[in-house]
Amino acid sequence: MASINTGIEWTDRTWNPTTGCNKVSPGCTHCYAEALTKRFPQNFKNGFELTLHENRLEEPTHWRKPSRIFVNSMSDLFHEEVPLEFLKKVFDVMGKTPQHIYQILTKRHQRLVELAPELEWHKNIWMGVSVENQNYVDRVDCLRQVPANVRFLSCEPLLGPLELNLTDIHWVIVGGESGLKHRPIKEEWVRSIREQCQNAEVAFFFKQWGGRTPKAGGRSLDDKIWDEMPEAWEQHRKKWERYSVGGFRRSNKAAMTA
C-alpha cells in the first residue's frame, strides 16, 4: 500500500509518505483506509497509527511517466502529528517532479491554513478538502485562502444536501459511500451540486453511487458519465505529452522552466 496504481477514477496512482489517521467528522466513520490496514496487517506494522515513511519520500522521482498522483490515500498529510519539516520534504519532492500532478486532500482545514504560508505551492500541486454535509462547508472557506493552482472539493461520501460557495474553486468530486454499512445518497443531492457547478463554471466529477462495493451502483447520472477535470489538467497534459518516456530525463530540466 506504499505507492500503487489505483482504481480511483480521478487519479492515476497513489503515494503514501505517511499512513494512519484518526476520525474527525462523519465522513470518517467507515474509513476505507482503516479497513485496509485491518485487512492487510502485514503491510502496516503500526496499524492505523500515524506513521511517517521517510523511505518513501523519493518514490515519485523514479516515476518517469507523467501521472496524477493522489497524495496520502491512506492518511491525511495535514494531520496534527505530521511535523512541518516532514511536510516541507514532501512539497520539495513534488516541486522537483513537475511532470506529475499531485492531488492532496484533507479534512484538517485549520491546520492547512495555518501551515500554508510555510510551504512552497508549486504549480503542479492541487489542494482539496472533504465536505460530506452542510456542517463542514467552512472547510471550503479555509481552502480559498490556500495559494494552490487548483483548489478542489471531495464530497464523498456525500451524506446530505450541500449549498456551496464555489468562488475560486476549480473542481468538485461527488460520490456515494461504499461498503457493508454504506449510508444512502440521494439523486437530488447530486443533481443540485452538478447544477451549482454548472452555474459557477466549475468542473464536476461524479465518481460513484456507492453500495456494497464501489462499483455496485455504477457511475451514470442522468444517462451520462461526468468525468470533468479542471482546465489546468488539460494544460498540463498537453505540455507534457511531447516528452516521451525515452527522452524524459534529458527533457525534464528544460520542461521545468518552460
Image (cartoon, rainbow, N blue to C red):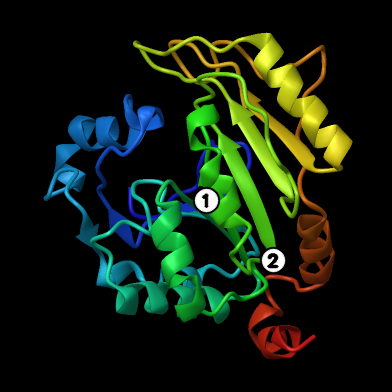
Q: Nearer the viewer, mark 2 or mark 1?
A: 2
Q: Looking at the image, which residue is at 80% across and 85% down?
A: 258
Alpha carbon distance from label 2 to label 1 = 20 Å
In the image: residue 214, left or right of residue 50: right
194 relative position to 10: left or right: right
Answer with mark 2 or mark 1, whichever residue precedes in sequence: 1
> Which residue position holds label 1?
13
Q: Report the side of 175 relative to 89 (left or right).
A: right
Q: Nearer the viewer, residue 184 or 160?
A: 160
**Mark 1 neighbour density, 10 Å: few (under 14) some (14–19) many (20 or more):** some
Q: Residue 35 appears at what percent x and percent y?
A: 27, 30
Residue at (35% x, 32% y) in the render: 28
Residue at left offset 63%, top offset 15%:
218
Which of the pair 251/120 is nearer the observer? 120
Left or right position of 237 against 48: right
Judge whether residue 248 can be spotted in this image: yes
Mark 2: amino acid: Asn
Please state the horizontal and vertical placement of residue 22, each as a whole percent of the image. Answer: 24, 42
Label 2 belongs to which residue?
149
> Few, some or many C-alpha atoms within 10 Å of disc 2 (few <14, some 14-19, many ≥20)?
some
* Residue type, numbered disc 1: Arg
